[in-house]
Image (cartoon, helix red, strand yellow):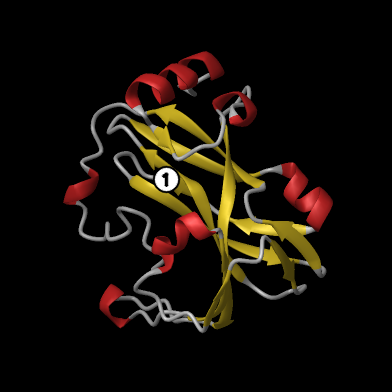
Amino acid sequence: MHIGKEQLKELIEKKQIITDFESIEKQITANGFDFRACAIVEITNAGKLAKEKKDNKKPELGKAYILEEYTERLNNYDIKEKSNEKTVKLKGLKPYLIISCEKVNTPENMMIHITPRSSLFRITQSLLGCSFGEAGYKGYMTFMLLPVLDCEIELGARIAQISFTQITGKANYEEQNESNYQGGKLF
């Protein structure tokens, strides 16, 4: 069952299933909750996805544009340069990682659906690579952004919508062998 606006608002206020938001009233929608961009990071060289996780190769990162209050989210990553510029000029057909301001505290009996806001592709002609969030996941969200044309995005702008669906049973996220993204790791 998809969680509607009133129930979602109650879960945010009482259970803090979403935190670090600017305004419930501005961000809640009929279908979910809008997430904002706190950082955009250039991907300069692709990584490698291997059969075995231990053989994966991380992508190389270039310049990162980040809101000052979120700089700790990029600690422990090899970033060439950090900038506090609020408006980011993006190059067409160049991939970027985009990180959310908001964090989720997904209950064990819910999963997250992630979709781009239509204004992202209507206004900036950009695609957002995203999927779903697992039950029990806690942390900020990371997506891949691919502008088709040169464009600009202001940090703090709403870029994705998160909605919740109830699932039967408990997910036991922490027991999964491949669950190393807890907290919001980039890779």
Q: Nearer the viewer, residue 94 or 157?
A: 157
In screen coordinates, is 123 left or right of 8? right
Quadrant of the image containing the C terminus:
bottom left
Q: Decide: is 138 above or below 74.
A: above
Residue 18 lies, in percent from the top left, at 43, 34
Please name the residue shown 34% across and 76% down the image: 51
Please name the residue shown 80% across and 64% down the image: 151
Q: Quadrant of residue 26?
A: top right
- Residue furthest top in the image: 6
Q: Nearer the viewer, residue 17 or 144?
A: 17
> Mark 1: which amino acid?
Gly
Q: Decide: is 114 above or below 143.
A: above
Mark 1, secondary structure of its residue: strand
Residue 66 lies, in percent from the top left, at 55, 63
Q: Decide: is 159 above or below 86.
A: above
Please name the residue shown 55% across and 61% down the image: 39
Q: Nearer the viewer, residue 88 or 116?
A: 88
Q: Residues within 10 Å of mark 1 (few under 14, many from 20)?
A: some
Please name the residue shown 32% across and 45% down the image: 137
In screen coordinates, is 119 left or right of 113? right
Quadrant of the image containing the N terminus:
top left
Residue 127 lies, in percent from the top left, at 69, 58
Residue under label 1, please give it: 133
Q: Quadrant of residue 181?
A: bottom left
The total of numbered circles placed on residues is 1
